[in-house]
Amino acid sequence: MKKKVLVVDDDPTVLELYVPYFTMKGYDTVGAVDGPEGLAILGREKIDVIVLDLAMPGMQGEDVMEKIAQNPDWKKIPIIVESALGPETGRPQKVKERFTGRLRFEIFQRPNSLEKLQEMMGEMIAL
């Protein structure tokens, strides 16, 4: 059975790149343009891994992660937090401090290769 990936990103270019790429790699992939849409999809579909943009207008990635952490049915889903915001912003470190021990997640720094992201996804799903 195919593993299902949810990509939550407000950048249409990212969705246009990630969704077909992961589908071609054998995943059942669905995209969401913002946090509320991503949470709605989580509410109605079984998701195996989430690729979540950190910086989005309105509901930020951290807000989505908080909602996931509060839901016992969702909090074990592995999350790849992806962002172009570098360590110098302090934001990735704040995410680590806030969610370590509460959620299973890794941080994926953009720009990076889709192959590296796929490798990270595979490792997280296998655990």
Image: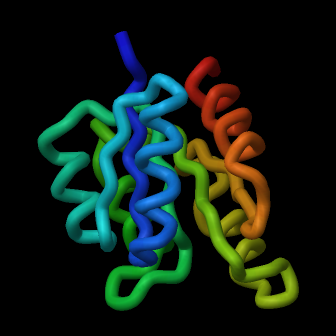
* Residue drawn at point x = 62 percent, y = 36 percent: 121
* Residue drawn at point x = 19 percent, y = 37 percent: 45
Image coords of residue 87 (percent x, y): 84, 79
Question: Vertical placement of 4 versus 13: above or below?
Answer: above
* Residue drawn at point x = 76 percent, y = 68 percent: 111
Q: Quadrant of residue 60?
A: bottom left
**Residue nearest the observer in this picture, 10 or 94:** 10
Left or right: residue 41 versus residue 88 is left
Left or right: residue 127 versus residue 59 is right
Image coords of residue 75 (percent x, y): 41, 43
State the residue lying farthest toward the right: 88
Q: Quadrant of residue 81?
A: bottom right
Image coords of residue 113 (percent x, y): 76, 53
Left or right: residue 66 versus residue 82 is left
Question: Vertical placement of 4 versus 95: above or below?
Answer: above
Left or right: residue 68 versus residue 73 is right
**Residue nearest the observer in this picture, 40 or 99:** 40
Image coords of residue 26 (percent x, y): 47, 23
> Quadrant where the C terminus lies?
top right
**Residue nearest the observer in this picture, 62 or 54:** 54
**Residue nearest the observer in this picture, 3 or 35:** 3
* Residue drawn at point x = 31 percent, y = 70 percent: 33
Q: Quadrant of residue 120?
A: top right
